[in-house]
Amino acid sequence: VSEKRSSPTRRRRITPYALLGPGLLWLLVFFAIPMYFMGELALRSGTLETGFTFSWDFANFSDALSRYDANFVRSFLYASAATFLALLIAYPLAYMIAFRAGRWKNVLLFAVVAPFFTTYLIRTIAWTTILSDDSFVVELASSLGVLNLFETAGFSDTSDRLLATPVAVVAGITYNFLPFMVLPIYASLERMDTRLIEAAKDLYSSASQAFFRVTLPLSAPGVVAGTLLTFIPAAGDYVNVLFLGSSNQSMVGNAIQSLYLQLRDYPTAAALSFMLMFVILVLVVIYIRFAGSEALMGDEEEAR
Amino acid sequence: VNQDPNNEDPGAPRRGRTALAVLAAFALATALLLAACGGDDVGGADEEEVTVAEAEGEASGNLNISNWPFYIDNKTVPEFQNNTDISVRYNEDVNDNSEFFGKVQPLLQNGESGGRDIMVVTDWMAKKMYDLGYLQNLDQEAVAPAKENLREDLASPAIDPERDYTLPWQTGMTGLVVNTAEASDVTSINDLFDPKYEGQVVMLTEMRDTVPLVMKADGIDPADATKEDWIAAIDKIRENVESGQIRRITGNDYTKDLANGDAVAVIGWSGDAVQLQEDDPNIEFVMPDEGCILWSDNMVIPVGATNPTAAYEWMNYVYEPENQAQIADYNYYLTPVTGVQEVLEQQGSEAAESELVFPDEEYTANCSTQTDPPGSAEDVAEVEQEFQSVITG
């Protein structure tokens, strides 16, 4: 009798792991194994001509950091700026789509995702035309004094142009990752119980109080997910600098590309990749501790 | 937090043990997999003898070619297919020597070419690949008809005195490409450092083009430049990148900067200027007062090429003056084949008159042949690292 009872129980215990199986296999093949090879490569020394031999060469890490410290600073500066800008743009947009769009909701959501129908590369290259020196955008920004403002504020070294300045790079990253910010915020606002806002107002809260004490905390999971989905890939991005920036904006991703494809210094490139991952991981852990992991997991009661 | 009703207390430790077991199995599987495929060598020159890619019987089957963009007209490949039993896959996947090398190196190291039968790379890269054992020697008998039409001055370059493993695709000049409506007074490399063109100057990521030209502007002959001369020229470029004089350093992309009006004077390639003229007649190739850099892109056969016989058929085909004329008329680079000018003259093509396609000795008098930085492999690597550090800021 007891066996008959335990068998379904055991099955119930195994089921979660069986469900995890494909995901674990995916992680193993496309994450764990490549990570191992990269870690091993990062500790090799030599040149392509003589061959890279394994030698516990930890100097690769300090070497990479001292050579590319400026790139690290830029990467995290630009990624933070782009994440912040994306949040500023995405929140009102997601709010509007979730609560005020009415029958336009699906059209607007489609409009947010529409750029993805063109590849990342093509979209970024299109920006080189949009922002080119003789373009309408640059002429308008110049006559409105915006370019001077950027220069005075230290966002750019020149008021002559937008391309090949940090402004263009940050704008490009913001644009490219905006949907990753909009969609999670929209999802968390969409499933929110709007009667809670009514309840807040019934309890004499003003519109802004209701927003800051009810709506914003309830959308926190979306905000946290959105900022992570934007910040992490943005910190490793190199395409925007390649097309919209110059050497003076070069990020860690560009340094890794240069090491892999131009200098063929695979160990230093691997070490640099590792450090990028490590720094991102540390920042993300701090951020989640700060923002609350419950918010990320979407436990609404805890988020409040 | 977790409100799972099945999560009774007594079950919890068991659950932890199962999780541990799964993790252990996961780790073991990882280790086994790694043991199975690990321990690969990365890099290192191949010690084996260079093989000859021998031609066998009639040419047929597939031919895979990797070449640079804008290097061939759209009629040559279909006509070649009509004249032979060969079907050609012509890929424009070479944008930059180093980057292409970075892409194919892991394949070549394992004796594979990713299906490629012919690759087109610049002299120095061909030599580098050859020294690493990534290329095969050409079957001299099979390629003899093409070699008969090879321009005499190209017969024995320093990198391959007997043309054992290379056959030029096109050669060309690196110099100034200028928007004459905006910067008509640019005639020297030194003019690129003129403050009035601040932020409108672009240089090439191809180190062996950009750095020797800057050197020549300072009166140094790249042929007998020292490593210090290279570093000094690179430092000069660095200063001008940091000051904003040079807008950016880029690959073939510079054509877009010129077309958009973002750059007015750049270091660029002769043939590109002619193609850009179609959209903007003000864009011209300007031979720098200091002279140009002469380079040569070569067809090579990589290790692991599956159809060398077809490759030779192709080489011989494009070395027929009539066929070559069609290519030269399109890309406006210097053709390596003799007798092309006569064909183009008969056809009444403008290319026959162009000093870019058929420069006389006076036009190229001050030009230098493209070279590597001097010294050992470590010295070259050091110079390359310096130059890359300019590009990655």
Image: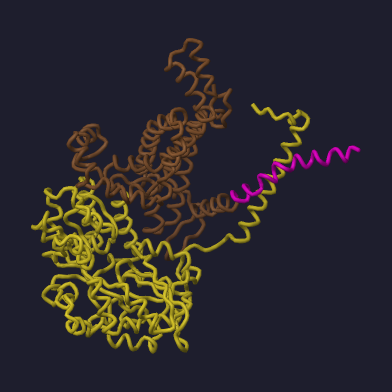
- Give percent across and percent down for residue B337: 26, 82
- Give percent across and percent down for residue A109: 45, 38
Which residue is at a point 26% across and 54% down the rendered structure image? Answer: B249
Name the image quarter holding residue B180.
bottom left
Left or right, residue B384 beside residue A158: right
Please identify which colour was used for chain B in the image.
Answer: yellow
Which quadrant, please, contains the N terminus of chain A? top right
- Give percent across and percent down for residue B231: 25, 57
Left or right, residue A225 beside residue B15: left
Q: Which of A59 and B275 is in front in this view?
A: B275
- Give percent across and percent down for residue B326: 26, 78
Please give the count of numbered marks on the rendered protein. Answer: 0
Region in magenta: A1-27
Residue B253 versus residue B123 in the image, above or below: above
Q: Which of B162 and A139 is in front in this view?
A: A139
Q: Which residue lies furthest to the top in this view?
A: A204
Which residue is at a point 33% across and 67% down the rendered structure image? Answer: B68
Q: Is residue B378 among what the camera can see?
A: yes
Q: Is residue B232 among what the camera can see?
A: no
Q: What secondary structure is the magenta-colored segment mainly?
A: helix
Coloring basis for residues: by chain
- Inspect the magenta stretch and tell me whether residue A18 lies in it: yes
Q: Which of B165 and A173 is in front in this view?
A: A173
Name the image quarter holding residue A85.
top left
Which residue is at a point 22% across and 34% down the rendered structure image? Answer: A146
- Inspect the magenta stretch and tell me whether residue A292 lies in it: no
Q: Nearer the viewer, residue B367 or A109?
A: A109
Q: Which chain is brown?
A: A
Q: Residue furthest left?
A: B185
Residue A172 versus residue B2 in the image, above or below: below
Left or right, residue B310 beside residue B247: right
Which quadrant, please, contains the C terminus of chain A? top right
